[in-house]
Image: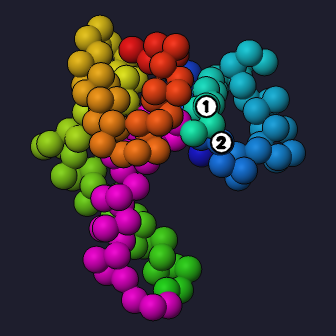
Amino acid sequence: WLLKMFPTQNTLLIVDRSTTHYGDLIDDWLAKNHAKNGGKIFIEYIPDGMTSIIQVCDIAINKPLSAEMLSGSVLSVPRESLIEMIETAYDEINTKNRKDRWIADAFEQCGQHPWLKQQDAFTKHLDSLDENFVYKHMKTSTSKLNLV
């Protein structure tokens, strides 16, 4: 899909450590399409335990996407209807995002805005993790790691 949508462009995939992102099928595809092998796809893996901190999709997209999909949910959904629900939810999110640009803001919040030198939003995001005991412990136990 990526190669069909962007045939002349280099593309960066930021991938979390889900087991669905590994295996022979993925390895074979990457061997053929990864930029270091002459392809146009660059891949960067998010370190274990960091998905909910720096994964833009988890922070900005999954919750609104689920909410949009659930707004039209029923107990059992045929495959065709599910695909239509997902497409409709994405269209709604894209329409709303044209005005508010919250997906673009999420890249800044996760420290991944490619043209922004200031990391204020990322620092604020990291500071907000102190409110959660698990993240606070992660942050203090890895204090030698300078994330900003």
Residue corresponding to mark 1: 47
Span colored in magenta: 50-76
Q: Secondary structure at mark 2?
A: loop
Where does the C terminus fall, quadrant-wise? top left
Quadrant placement of the N terminus = top right
Instruction: Identify which residue, 118 or 64, lies in the foreground.
Output: 118
For this view, does 62 lie left or right of residue 18? Answer: left
Which colour scheme appears in the figure?
Answer: rainbow
Tell me which corner region of the image, top left, top right, bottom left or bottom right, holds residue 120: top left
Tell me if residue 59 is in the magenta stretch. Answer: yes
Question: In x, y percent, where is residue 123?
Answer: 30, 22
Horizontally, residue 29 falls left or right of residue 115, namely right
Give the Cα distance between marks 2 and 1: 7 Å
Q: How many residues crowd mark 2 within 10 Å: few (<14), some (14–19), many (20+)? A: some
Number of numbered tags placed on the structure image: 2
Q: Are marks 2 and 1 in contact (CB under 8 Å)?
A: yes
Q: Residues within 10 Å of mark 1 (few under 14, many from 20)?
A: few
Identify whether 14 is placed above or below 144.
below
